[in-house]
Amino acid sequence: MSELYDIKIFRSDEVAFFKCDSGPLQMRVGGKVLEEISIHRAFPFSAPYEHLSVWNGETELGIIHNIEDLDKESQKALKQELHVRYVIPEVTRVLSIKEEPGLWTFNLETDRGKMKLMMRNIHEHLTVLPQNRIIITDMDGKRCEIRSLKSLDLSSRKELSKVI
C-alpha cells in the first residue's frame, strides 16, 4: 500500500523569511509567523538556490522553487541560513591519494585546515559538477569541494589524475 504525500509549493507572494537580531530563521505565511525554521537543499548541487525544503522542527512545510523569486530580505535571510548550514571546506591542495585494499584515503589541505577523507568505492564518493567542480564525500558524510581543477597546483592535479 502506498501513501500519497501533498507537497506544498510556496509562491513568492505568500511567504517571507526573516531573522530577528541573531535569532533563528522565521517565516511569515498566511498572516502567521513560524519560528525556528530550517532550510534544506535538495539536489542538484549545481542549483544551490532552487528546490529548497522548508522545515519547522520535524515537519516539512513545503518547497521553494527558486530563492530568486522571493523578496530581497527573504533572499538574504535564506542565503545566510544556507551558508551556515552548508559550509563546505574548499580544497587548496591534494597532498596524497592512496589506495589500500578496499579503502581509499585522501589527504587534503583546505581553507579550513588539513582533512583526511576515507572511502570504499571512490566513484560513489566523487561528484563531478559543471565547470570542473568536484564534491568529495567520505564514508562518514564529511564533504569538501574542489571549486576548479585549474585552480590547483600541478602536484595536486597529478594526484587527482589517479582517480578522475
Image (cartoon, grey):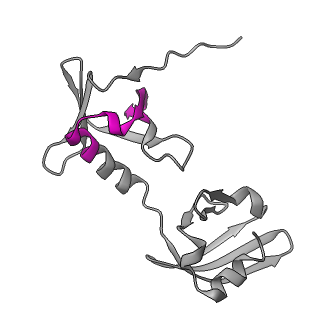
Residue 19, compared with residue 136, is above or below; it is: above
Q: Is residue 99 left or right of residue 34?
A: right
Q: Quadrant of residue 66?
A: top left
> Residue 132, percent across and down?
61, 65
Does the magenta-highlighted stretch encompass residue 61? yes
Q: Which residues are magenta?
A: 52-77
Seen as rendered, the residue at the extreme right is: 101
Coordinates of residue 130 in the picture (x, y in percent): 60, 56
Q: Residue furthest bottom?
A: 155
- Specify whether 11 is left or right of 111: left
| Residue 115 visible, this orientation | no
On screen, residue 92 above or below 17: below
Q: Residue at x 57, y 44 (%)?
A: 44
Q: On the rendered image, what quadrant is the C terminus found in?
A: bottom right
Residue occupying the point 55% across, 16% down: 5
Residue 32 colored in magenta in the image: no
- x and y percent of residue 48 in the render? 46, 47
Q: Nearer the viewer, residue 51 or 132?
A: 132
Q: Is residue 67 above or below residue 113?
A: above
Q: Quadrant of the N terminus?
A: top right
The reply, left or right, for residue 134 in relation to residue 1 is: left
Q: Position of residue 30 (x, y in %)?
A: 23, 17
The structure residue drawn at horizontal position 25% and vertical position 45%, both measured from the top left corner, is 77
Is residue 127 visible from the viewing direction of this image?
A: yes
Q: Nearer the viewer, residue 138 or 97?
A: 97
Q: Residue furthest left?
A: 21
Q: Residue at 54% of width from left, 50% of height from top?
A: 46
